[in-house]
Amino acid sequence: MVTGCARLPPVDRAVLKAETSSELQQQLLDHEPQIDLFRSMGPFAVTVQQNWPLQLSPKERLESDLFLSNVPERAPLAIFLHGHDSTKGAHAKQAMHLASWGVHCLILQLPNKGPWDANGRTLARVASLIHRSPQMFDARIDVNKIILVGYSFGASAVAVALAQGAPAAGGILLDPAAIGKDLPDQLRRIDKPVMVIGADDEVYSPRNREYFFDFIRGGIAEVSIKGAAHEDAQFPSDFALRNQGMDPNTTEELQMNFVSVLTSAALSISATGAFEYAWTSFAPAFETGKFFNAKKK
């Protein structure tokens, strides 16, 4: 847990010249947490491998995109899963941004109409494979710092994976929607930290989003982004990918709000094992009303 953050000096981007992911994390912990800092790209270059074949078993090959942070040492890995009727491309800019902050990213393409409990079990198997054999992906993956990220119904799959005991440090849920009659029981079994980043429920309220906070017993935090639509939790949105980059339901400003929270949360859990650093970084946005619906247990 980060303590005494209010007394720490603000970070100057000039100091963020770390050569390793752990060095960057320590520099951030030594300064006051600032959510707006994470709206900018981080200090690391990124190597992208699109349509990377992930051989899950001799008969199972998954499609994925891999975003590798150009750091010389082991670094965290975030595994993304899309939502209903969507694709891995709808999280490409989020993954690029996060990798520039020293977190490798893998975006999976799984059946986009579900069943989401089956997708969750597949996600758990992917995490276990990486944990056992990171060199199949990249030797610089820190297997003790795997983070599962799910959007909409993909968040239900992340919850199932965590409940199944996937070797992950925690989960980040992007405007999650709950599906599956057994999901409440699965949520009660989760014992890893979870961060819910919600859209504005006056704009759109996804199916049973309240389940995640209500049924996960502890270690969960939730924040909503004022004015954000469900599609703002993607970047680019799936609709934009299909329509020459245009989506009237999203704004880049609000998409970047999701990105900044995602980045702060991922760095927080990878550096400290909890979300307290990220939560402290949200304080100015809570005061201005940019973020709201703050709750944790």
Image: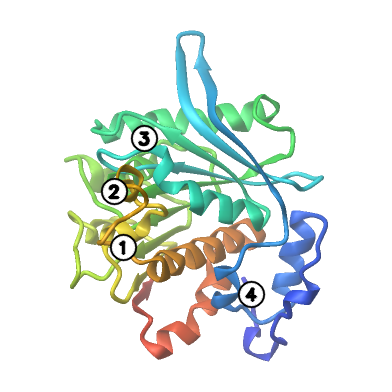
Mark 1 → mark 2, Cα distance in angstroms: 9 Å
Mark seen at residue 292? none
Instruction: Say whether disc 4 or disc 2 marks the residue closer to the N-terminus.
Output: 4
Instruction: Say whether disc 1 or disc 4 marks the residue closer to the N-terminus.
Output: 4
Q: Which residue is mark 3?
A: 120
Point out residue 238 in the picture as x, y percentages from the top left corner.
32, 46
Is 28 on the left-hand or right-hand side of 90? right
Mark 1 → mark 4, Cα distance in angstroms: 34 Å
Residue at 51% over, 67% down? 260
Instruction: Say whether disc 1 or disc 3 marks the residue closer to the N-terminus.
Output: 3
Q: Which residue is mark 1?
A: 250
Mark 3 → mark 4, Cα distance in angstroms: 31 Å
Question: The residue under label 4 is which amino acid type?
Answer: Val
Point out residue 194 in the picture as x, y percentages from the top left corner.
43, 57
Q: Secondary structure at mark 1?
A: loop
Q: Which mark is in front, 1 or 3?
A: 1
Residue at 41% over, 84% down? 286
Q: Which residue is mark 4?
A: 2
Q: Which residue is mark 2?
A: 239
Residue at 49% over, 31% down? 64
Q: Is residue 149 above or below residue 132?
A: below
The image quadrant that residue 201 belongs to is bottom left
Q: Are circles 1 and 4 on residues that touch, CB within 8 Å? A: no
